Image (cartoon, coloured by chain):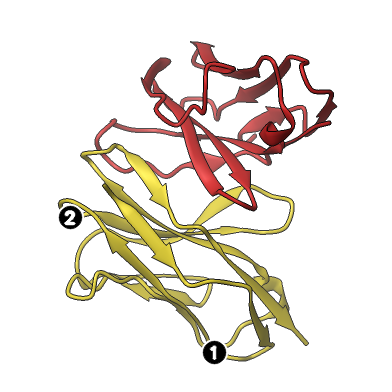
Amino acid sequence: GDSVTQMEGPVTLSEEAFLTINCTYTATGYPSLFWYVQYPGEGLQLLLKATKADDKGSNKGFEATYRKETTSFHLEKGSVQVSDSAVYFCALFTGTASKLTFGTGTRLQVTL
Amino acid sequence: DAGVIQSPRHEVTEMGQEVTLRCKPISGHNSLFWYRQTMMRGLELLIYFNNNVPIDDSGMPEDRFSAKMPNASFSTLKIQPSEPRDSAVYFCASGLGDLNLYNEQFFGPGTRLTVL
């Protein structure tokens, strides 16, 4: 079945540091890939997406590139801020399952 | 515009009691999802509806859990009887579109359930 594997957290960084959160996937067919973010005390919200190989999703300074050859969708940001502290979820969607499959989430803590 | 509305936001109950969680999706959305989030198991999809019809309930943990969607603007998730291991944050999400195409899911703020 479909699955998403994320790097273990928590990730602790100083403000303005470079961020990478790894995500790899297993899926039948050609999935669409997503990053969702959950701020403290809130529900998840879509951060960015990519629907086909080599697409790059971007939003709020975050980027992720759909790499079919490595089945990966790593999240990056060049300079994190304290306000980026949250839990980040990688997810995929295939028409076969008609539902999102989420990873376990990676907690990011950014300090001054 | 109002987002997904969930009630109550917090619920504390004793083991064996019935618990009902409520969700109002975004107006016009035709898909609705119930998730459970715990530290141990992460985010789990329990059930989802499309056009008020349950499509996949394979994530419902056991017969103590049931979900209904009597109309396009309301859904309930019921646990009867509740157990301490049901303690979690329960999220409702809604989306718009065809079943086999990705539709962005908009999440509610969640209901934090504590079963003593």
**Badge 2: few (under 14), some or many (20 or more) residues near its Cα, within 10 Å?**
some
Q: How many labels does the image show?
A: 2
Q: Is residue B93 above or below residue A3?
A: above
- Report the chain holding disc 2: A
Query: Looking at the figure, which quarter contains the N terminus of chain B?
Result: top right
Residue ID for mark 2: A30
Q: In this view, does B110 lie to the left or right of B45?
A: right
Query: Looking at the figure, which quarter contains the C terminus of chain B?
Result: top right
Q: Earlier in the sequence, mark 2 or mark 1?
A: 1
Q: Colour of chain A?
A: yellow
Q: In this view, does A40 lie above or below B104?
A: below
Residue ID for mark 1: A18
Secondary element at tag 2: loop
Q: Chain B is drawn in which colour?
A: red
Residue drawn at x 67%, y 59% is: A39
Residue drawn at x 43%, y 15% is: B52
Q: Quadrant of residue B4?
A: top right
Q: Quadrant of residue A4?
A: bottom left
Q: Which amino acid does label 1 sit on?
A: Phe
- Residue A55: percent from left, percent from top: 25, 70
B30, B40: nearer the viewer: B40
**Badge 1: few (under 14), some or many (20 or more) residues near its Cα, within 10 Å?**
few
Q: In which quarter of the image is residue A106?
A: bottom right
- Report the chain holding disc 1: A
Secondary element at tag 1: loop
Q: Is residue B69 left or right of residue A99?
A: right
Residues at marks 2 and 1, common chain? yes
Q: In this view, does A101 lie to the left or right of B66?
A: left
- Residue B43: percent from left, percent from top: 54, 47
Q: Between marks 2 and 1, how big is the CA–CA gap?
A: 30 Å
Residue drawn at x 64%, y 91% is: A16
